[in-house]
Image (cartoon, rainbow, N blue to C red):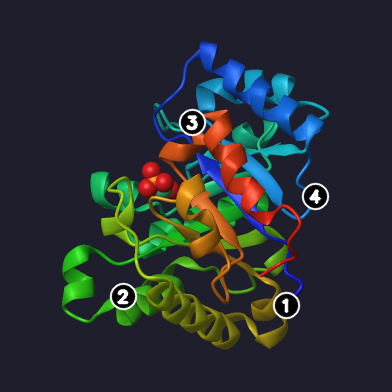
Amino acid sequence: MRGIRPLVAGNWKMHGLGTSSAELRSLKDRLAEAPVPEADAIVCPPATLLARARDVLAGSAVALGAQDCHPLPSGPHTGDISAEMLADAGATAIIVGHSERRTDYGETDALVNAKAKAAFRAKLAAIICVGETELERRQGATLEVVRRQLQGSLPRGARARTTVIAYEPVWAIGTGLTPTPADVAEVHGFIRGELGQLLGQTEASLLRILYGGSVKPANASELLFVPDVDGALVGGASLKASDFYGILLAYAGRGAG
Ligand code: PGA
């Protein structure tokens, strides 16, 4: 056991209205009734729900995070939201560099790096996403792509306490497809090694590396107890309290991976 405390992070993406507070309340209640002290939990709803989610989750074991931010603290950027604003609304972490943003908005590693720095500036954690496309995997370029994304997206001087890497193969997101545990182990071990080069061995040995892409209660045990997997970034299955809790339950009674 390496002693890294696992994290299960829920990424709601562009889902959720005020009525979704009921799911958060249900998650809070389940965890109050049957806690899973072996793992941390964080839910990242859309920015519109942060303030309400903060109220609902107050006093619970579930932390609150956000999705994406602008690199600057404020300014003339219509429609954008800064890390400071997200912190003000109750977020403790921000997901940056998700493949959907890299694809939809052409976000580069340099921009993701600036966004991660913005999160640190606002005293928030950054959950930095990397992962190869289906074509890149077929071409045998997975490790090369992940190395390039890490080198470009991870700010120098990032600390394990405030940084999380999420490995999300693009082809596994929302598709029901998942890599084999051996493939996950290979990429996560590679990421740990790269982090050692980039941040030094101590930080690398403490930094959480999450797996993301079609994680659900039924496959959580298989994917989350792979070496160097320190938790999950969960999309679809985070929208229902029962599923998200079901994934957390994989850790119940078990130590860190
Ligand atoms: P999924 O999404 O769990 O729905 O595959 C994961 C993610 O994109 O973070």
Horizontal and vertical percent for residue 39?
A: 72, 53
Ligand 1: does it lie within 8 Å of the C-beta at label 1? Answer: no
Please state which of residues 155 and 61 is positioned toward the viewer in this rendering.
61
Q: Mark 3 packing: few (<14 Cα in 10 Å), some, or many (20+)?
A: many
Give, as a three-letter code, the residue at label 1.
Answer: Arg
Question: Which label sits on residue 2?
Answer: 1
On screen, residue 98 above or below 140 = above
On the rendered structure, is 15 left or right of 5? left
Q: Give the amino acid at mark 4.
A: Pro
User: As displayed, is residue 147 above or below residue 245?
Assistant: below
Answer yes or no: do the residues labelled 3 and 4 have beta carbons within 8 Å?
Answer: no
Image spot of residue 128 (x, y percent)? 50, 59
- In which image quadrant can residue 179 be found? bottom left
The mark nearer the N terminus, 1 or 2, is 1
Mark 3 and mark 4 lie on one chain; the one further toward the N terminus is: 4
- Camera-side residue: 57 or 146? 57
